[in-house]
Image (tube, rainbow, N blue to C red):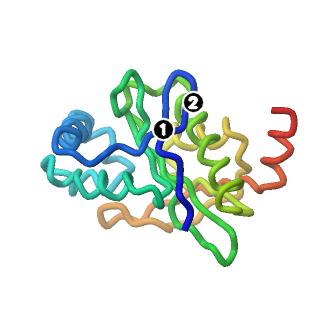
């Protein structure tokens, strides 16, 4: 098992494994609740987040050093989360999943967070391919993938069911060889 760093400095924000605590769960719930309609367009788990206690399992999971998930911290406040999901060891493929408070959109935070997670995927986990999948209607999420240099591969028609409605998912990817070229002079 891989031990992931507790914190990753990204300049004006950091990715951090936050200790599970009720105050943090309450803060997360209030953040999600204040943006419920906005977030629920794309994230089904928002429907199951009806009290602070519902946030605790997410905190517990992401706090583990062997789990590749982080909260995005700006000015010592959680403003989002990013995670490596659907790790396929056999085919050396992983997907990045993320969410960000609408109050922090447009600052390049998520694009830079994606780059930090790529480094974990390619360097620490030895992945060959990283994917970002997003509802085709989620223009902001699709734009993050594009700004981060992911190659558009196509649409998986009806691949995700959100509240009983099939949705089309855009798939973008980056290969390790592409990432190495991007980071050769960094």
Q: Position of residue 147 (x, y in %)?
A: 67, 35
Q: Position of residue 140 (x, y in %)?
A: 51, 37
- Figure label count: 2
Q: Residue at x 78, y 47 (%)?
A: 179
Q: Quadrant of the N terminus?
A: bottom right
**Front-lying residue, 55 or 35:** 55
Q: Position of residue 128 (x, y in %)?
A: 74, 63
Q: Which SS class for mark 2? A: loop
Distance from disc 2 to disc 1, alpha carbons, whole Å, reads: 7 Å
Tell whether 175 sits left or right of 130: right
The residue at which mark 1 appears reads as: 15
Q: Quadrant of the C terminus?
A: top right
- Please, is residue 51 above or below residue 167 in the view? above
Q: How busy is the neighbourhood of tag 2: few (under 14 within 10 Å), some, or many (20 plus)?
A: some
Tell whether 53 sits left or right of 58: left
Q: Which SS class for mark 1? A: strand
Tell whether 69 sits left or right of 79: right
Q: Of marks 2 and 1, which one's residue comes earlier in the chain? A: 2
Tell whether 152 sits left or right of 95: right
Whether residues under marks 2 and 1 lie with C-beta atoms below 8 angstroms apart, the answer is yes
Q: Residue at x 50, y 68 (%)?
A: 159
Q: Position of residue 79 (x, y in %)?
A: 37, 33
Q: Which mark is residue 186?
A: none
Q: Residue at x 39, y 38 (%)?
A: 80
The residue at which mark 2 appears reads as: 10
Q: Residue at x 43, y 36 (%)?
A: 72
**Front-lying residue, 76 or 156:** 76
Q: Quadrant of residue 65?
A: bottom left
Q: How busy is the neighbourhood of tag 1: few (under 14 within 10 Å), some, or many (20 plus)?
A: many
């Amino acid at each position: 098992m891989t031990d992931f760093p507790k914190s990753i400095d990204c300049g004006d924000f950091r990715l951090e494994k936050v200790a599970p605590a009720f105050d943090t769960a309450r803060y997360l719930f209030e953040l999600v609740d204040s943006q419920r309609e906005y977030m629920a367009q794309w994230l089904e788990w928002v429907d199951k987040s009806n009290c602070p206690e519902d946030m605790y399992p997410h905190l517990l999971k992401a706090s583990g050093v062997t789990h590749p998930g982080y909260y995005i911290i700006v000015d010592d406040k959680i403003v989002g989360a990013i995670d490596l999901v659907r790790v396929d060891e056999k085919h050396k493929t992983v997907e990045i999943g993320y969410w960000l408070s609408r109050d922090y959109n447009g600052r390049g935070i998520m694009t830079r967070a994606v780059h930090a997670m790529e480094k974990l995927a390619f360097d620490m986990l030895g992945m060959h391919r990283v994917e970002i999948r997003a509802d085709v209607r989620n223009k902001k999420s699709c734009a993050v993938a594009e700004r981060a240099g992911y190659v558009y591969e196509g649409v998986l028609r009806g691949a995700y069911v959100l509240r009983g409605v099939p949705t089309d998912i855009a798939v973008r990817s980056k290969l390790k060889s592409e990432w190495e070229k991007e980071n050769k002079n960094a």
